[in-house]
Amino acid sequence: MTSTTAVTAGAGWDPTTLQSRYDEVRSYTETLAAPLSPEDQTVQSMADVSPTKWHRAHVTWFFETFVLADNEASFAPFQDKYWFLFNSYYEAVGPRYSRADRGLISRPGAHDVGVYRSNVDDRMHDLIARLDDGALTKLASTIELGFHHEQQHQELLLMDIKHVLSRNPLQPVYAGRPTAESTPDRLGWVEVDGGLVEVGHEGSRDGGFCFDNELPRHEQWLRPFRIADRLITNGEWWEFMADGGYRRHEHWLSDGWAKVTTEGWEAPFYWTEVDGVWFEHTLHGTWPVNPGLPVSHVSFYEAEAYASWAGKRLPTEAEWEHAARGATASTTDVPTGNLANTTSFHPEAAPPASGGLRQMFGDCWEWTSSAYHPYPGFHPPAGAIGEYNGKFMSNQMVLKGGCALTPAGHTRASYRNFFPHQSRWALSGVRLADDGAAA
Amino acid sequence: MTSTTAVTAGAGWDPTTLQSRYDEVRSYTETLAAPLSPEDQTVQSMADVSPTKWHRAHVTWFFETFVLADNEASFAPFQDKYWFLFNSYYEAVGPRYSRADRGLISRPGAHDVGVYRSNVDDRMHDLIARLDDGALTKLASTIELGFHHEQQHQELLLMDIKHVLSRNPLQPVYAGRPTAESTPDRLGWVEVDGGLVEVGHEGSRDGGFCFDNELPRHEQWLRPFRIADRLITNGEWWEFMADGGYRRHEHWLSDGWAKVTTEGWEAPFYWTEVDGVWFEHTLHGTWPVNPGLPVSHVSFYEAEAYASWAGKRLPTEAEWEHAARGATASTTDVPTGNLANTTSFHPEAAPPASGGLRQMFGDCWEWTSSAYHPYPGFHPPAGAIGEYNGKFMSNQMVLKGGCALTPAGHTRASYRNFFPHQSRWALSGVRLADDGAAA
Amino acid sequence: MTSTTAVTAGAGWDPTTLQSRYDEVRSYTETLAAPLSPEDQTVQSMADVSPTKWHRAHVTWFFETFVLADNEASFAPFQDKYWFLFNSYYEAVGPRYSRADRGLISRPGAHDVGVYRSNVDDRMHDLIARLDDGALTKLASTIELGFHHEQQHQELLLMDIKHVLSRNPLQPVYAGRPTAESTPDRLGWVEVDGGLVEVGHEGSRDGGFCFDNELPRHEQWLRPFRIADRLITNGEWWEFMADGGYRRHEHWLSDGWAKVTTEGWEAPFYWTEVDGVWFEHTLHGTWPVNPGLPVSHVSFYEAEAYASWAGKRLPTEAEWEHAARGATASTTDVPTGNLANTTSFHPEAAPPASGGLRQMFGDCWEWTSSAYHPYPGFHPPAGAIGEYNGKFMSNQMVLKGGCALTPAGHTRASYRNFFPHQSRWALSGVRLADDGAAA
Amino acid sequence: MTSTTAVTAGAGWDPTTLQSRYDEVRSYTETLAAPLSPEDQTVQSMADVSPTKWHRAHVTWFFETFVLADNEASFAPFQDKYWFLFNSYYEAVGPRYSRADRGLISRPGAHDVGVYRSNVDDRMHDLIARLDDGALTKLASTIELGFHHEQQHQELLLMDIKHVLSRNPLQPVYAGRPTAESTPDRLGWVEVDGGLVEVGHEGSRDGGFCFDNELPRHEQWLRPFRIADRLITNGEWWEFMADGGYRRHEHWLSDGWAKVTTEGWEAPFYWTEVDGVWFEHTLHGTWPVNPGLPVSHVSFYEAEAYASWAGKRLPTEAEWEHAARGATASTTDVPTGNLANTTSFHPEAAPPASGGLRQMFGDCWEWTSSAYHPYPGFHPPAGAIGEYNGKFMSNQMVLKGGCALTPAGHTRASYRNFFPHQSRWALSGVRLADDGAAA
């Protein structure tokens, strides 16, 4: 869900651009929180969700802990207890407040967190302004890591508040309006050759920054395969449901079927049936399900069952990444565009078919059939900041491509997102694959 | 915990006094909520606790549902969904929002609840002003019941926010300051004759209002007994702890011992040991335990174990009530006084011994050895408003006397409070009893 | 459920009668276990249930621990680990094997337990034969307590194996055959005067032996009341069900309604509907529910809901006991008769009405509305053997009268059985009461 | 854990050899059950474990369901309810008895299960004797699948009864005696080239039979790697423990660390410390831990943490399989030898180093770092018998090599066993790997 270990150096930064980027990232967090009342920012609706004000404080704590603590002349934490309250999972940094109890903490309130943010911003400004070239080179990569860390939490903040608001019978709207009803066009397929391919982050093509789990770049052997040219839509998911998709054990993994039966799954996570009509909770309000939009908020188990029902399969991570690189030039889809902005926090309908891949980036995180494991030769960096990626590499599946909530500049083909098989509150969707003609 | 069924008629009310009392009760709720931020008012720290803004809305819903709905010329609820959100347990009124999930509801926020309160207040004003004598007689008892219902929730609001704040490592203060350190004086005993005594509410002596569970007044046969002249203090509780009180199974009921071992009880609920010093969380902040104050926030199991360790027992409800009535004249303790006000939300040290009973009212709810069962001849009133008391008469023990959080005018000898054996978040304490000399 | 503390001395025993009674009680346990295979004797179907071979060993451990250990010339336990495995709840005797895991212990097997029993029987024979008068007086009461303790476990053994066999889709039969179908006659009522009455064990009238919880005999004040002349039947329970008894919250205590909804209660514990016909699992096999027999295996919550639905109430313990004593002479019901024998392990239809009380003893344990609390002046005996009764006096209700599984000679008016409100696997039934005409 | 779908045809069978093999496999199950009493065979010590008599019946049900039902002239099940009781997970065959409750079923007893087995054996004899060539070809592969299925359950029977006996404070012995104490020699490493390799079952080399999950044979790209020449020993595990292995979060996956802390892991599953000495529960009894034997009954999380602590990693499945094939010729280790027999149910010390791989087969199932996912191009066979492998392909890791409990003839390089990351009751161990010199 969030990764914090960067590998590539922060080459090319000067204090002015670093400061400017810092302000840009930090202010976007506040933009996202602005529509939310103090009460909204306090609630934790399940253990996986964090309150908005916790996100705002935690990303601030990150800069205070990993940048200011070792580099301020006479460092003192803004508030001792914040060290404990806003640590997320870094065992090496010391004890931390229980994750599942973040919603029990009314103070510091939303306003107090703003004060904390301003304080750290001021100190970061001072620090950056004082950096000489040597110090800049040394610190910039950590600060840049802080940008990407905060961007991950911007996305989580939106996924989390979506869940919070979904539990409220008043059906609150976060912002904006839904798009017009549309219908899906015909699903197309793109053939991809196999052979020995390279996967993982490649500096020049992917851009300067990556997380440690995207490395080392390495070779994998692929059979020829086919991959769908767009995401599965709500309309197609209806057909699955109408054909008994949630009642036919033969399409489900055993663990998935256990979820279906014990938790009563019968539709995607945010769908509700009222008097025969299916409604979907979105950040833009609760509206009738729009058949032309990508289905979203389905678990890996549901994605896998759908693929089984459709007689297809999910792509592997390597297949997806290999296809995405080849696709870039031949489609209108731009990896770093089509992303979240204040008017659209929901996936959109696919553009007209063009023979290439559509919707590869920025609509839904796409489930792959690959477990989230380290790449060959992976070794986590030393120290607290390197704690993250290594230790979450079990019981999770890889998702690719970014979603409508992903901040601009935070998407690339080698990015490895990951969630447990049963997760449904992430903005996840489904792209099908199949064995190639020659297989 | 809360009771909603009144029996005695609202005799003696005229529109002016009714209006005045309405305003007094309603505004005291807002006084209690005033020190709490919107975030404070949102949190539910465990299933037994309700958020402050829920309490504020629920008591308002009570007037809207049980008074306005049937008596306004063209009634429409302020907000349809509030009907669902702010019903507490009245099955007859329709479905209700899950109790354990009250903390997931960020909207309506604290301000919106204030708007709801004002709206209902205006409508109540209009209604009361328009009442003729017949309607007044008919409605006044329900409105008066609403006063007592709201007063119960005033007390619960304080117990609940005490728990919410206790979970916060920042150790927030609700209001005020703790009292000076004191030491307990010697515990005295008052001998009480037995024989055939009457218990239950008696109109003229106890005042006009009572809940249905205080009736019918009836006879019980008592053996002679002795009852302690004050509550057990923190200092005495220390001796129990120092003597291994929480480690010696022989003093505990089996169910209580299971709690001790599985939940790791080793001191009263709000005590914490830091470097060998015991601190107590109070609404006035977290301070070293004060030996002269009554021990508070102990469960029935702890009270019972303490009594066993001390070689005594707890009083029965009938013994307590019988003693309390006899005691009134011979002590300086006034049943309706010594209650919560904005400067003291914690039990106080006992006044100097005078030969009579001390601290019978308004310090701690006192555990009795009596199960909370109906009195002989009890029949719950018909309709939704009568749902309450009958249905909670299992697995609970009776407590008597009111506590430091009980609003003024809400305490009487016949009042029957009740909590499960293991409850610790209520402001409960311990008074010992023993068999009489003649027994 | 089981009580182990006797108060009255074992007056009147001589070695011969003591030996004879010992053999009689001990061999009846083996008679009850005889129809059960080694596999049957191993299973624990829920935490409340103990395996048959555990019961057989535990009652043996009781004699070894409380009689032989202090009185054999050179005592050594038969097997060290048995001391740990077959202790039930005596904290003072040392650690014990987890109750909920008794079904995980395959060894000692059923045969090995028989060897253990024989060994202890031989040693008990030797000891009793060697007792002089003084030692006899001293030991006889503990040995007699062992008889009553073993008799309690004879009853539990049957209740427990009934549950074990109920979980098996093969519908095994323990023994015997069901009685012929019958229909209930009209329920009659017996009026009883109130006033100051005595309850608790009275030596000469009740017989020599009692448990400590039946004392002290003491006075209670009763209002006049009426009590049903027989138990509620299956046929009457059908009417309750047909009238929506399990779906109408207004008749249920809140805790009971929670059980109904979360556990899906819709009929007595051992009833199952197959194609529209209700069947009942009994120790004699699974047969269509017989309308004339007493309803059995209902919880306190169900008994209370039934009484509410019928416009009546349950009797208090004092009412039941007072009525039972007066009734003896005027009915054909004999307190110590009509009990379990190897041909009938199920309650029987009531005898024809005679104006007096029927079925007071030996059909179903009858729920009262009284919590299981100590009698005024009760003090548990010192030492491990006195651990039992005091420590279970919370969260349980009193039942009176014995049931069809109660061994002969183990029933009396002052006997206080007790189970939690929700228990259904005990052979419990319902007798109604009501306020008297003069009330 | 168990797989039931065969792919390769039962080529080469004639009725006589088929009959002979049938008798051999079936009688070995009874040989394994022979030391166990009826009580031993009844107990289910946790949900993952099945009672011995259930295993004996389930493998019999397999032949009755998948062979006899469609091929007997006038088929009727031996007992209707057995169809329900002894189905394991085949949704397509109909409802089945709850897995977690298998220990509640006392009947059919161990003897009755023997009667069931004999009945099915007789009918299988009749059927096989009557098969003509065409029918033989058609049925032999299903019958052969039944052999491998029963062999899997032979292994599970032993793992399960090991767990059952481990819960008994009497420390029962299943059979045999432990081996003499030994000390580990120096761990050696074998270098393996990478490149494009083939994995999956290869008919001629691996033998005729395989499960569907071993196919299709396919190519994978491997980097050069090194693999340890033997399993990690108890002695080496001690060093890990002594160095704080179970207390240092930095070596653990996050999910694994959660298990360590919530379940109190501090040593392998069957180790217990008594007065400073570590003992290990084995099927041969409870004995001091033997430093020279392979460590066993560790979870994937523990294996992975050990590898991290040692500065190495676990092998991938492809690495293991590729190494195992190359190793065969250069070591004395025979894939199908060194297996369970009635005198040794525990892994043995490694043979002296020879430059090649040791202990690759038949000591401990070896954890790999590969998730249990389908091979490229895998499609489960149609019908109930094909239900198994596809549906368990989530949340499990692959283990290779067989263990000391694996029956003779049931081990091969392509065999894919699988267990959840936290499983410890399987006989699992640890072999290290590392990146190759050229990597």
Image (spheres, coloured by chain):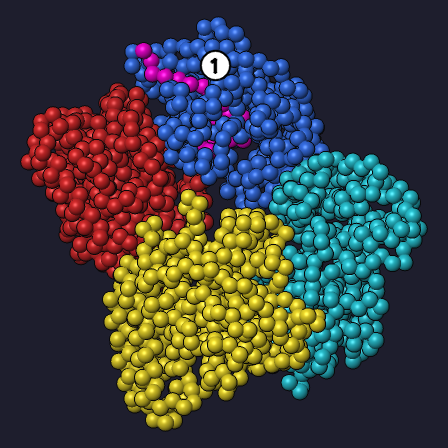
Chain colours: A cyan, B blue, C red, D yellow
For residue D10, which quarter of the picture? bottom left
For residue A415, which quarter of the picture? bottom right
Residue B24 among magenta residues: no
Q: Could one spot residue D105 in this view of the protein?
A: no
Give the quarter of the figure containing the C terminus of chain B: top left
* D57 with respect to A362 (left or right): left
* B24 with respect to A120 (left or right): left
Q: Could one spot residue C383 in this view of the protein?
A: yes
Residue B227 drawn at (x, y percent): 41, 14
Residue D161 drawn at (x, y percent): 36, 61
The residue located at (34%, 77%) in the rendering is D25
Residue at the limit of the structure toward the bottom, as seen here? D133
Most foreground residue, C293 or B271 = B271
Q: Secondary structure at mark 1?
A: loop
Question: Label 1 amino acid?
Answer: Arg
Which residue is labeled 1 in the image? Answer: B230
Task: Decide: is C21 above or below C208.
Answer: below
* A5 with respect to B141 (left or right): right
Q: Which segment is the magenta one?
A: B417-437
Task: Decide: is B8 above or below D67.
Answer: above
Residue B373 drawn at (x, y percent): 39, 30
Q: Total of numbered circles in the picture?
A: 1
The dominant secondary structure in magenta is loop
Most foreground residue, B57 or D294 = D294
The residue located at (57%, 82%) in the rendering is D217
The residue located at (66%, 30%) in the rendering is B171
- Label 1 lies in what chain? B
Residue B429 among magenta residues: yes
The residue located at (33%, 89%) in the rendering is D15
Most foreground residue, D181 or A268 = D181
- Tag 1: Cα neighbours inside 10 Å, few (<14), some, or many (≥20)? many
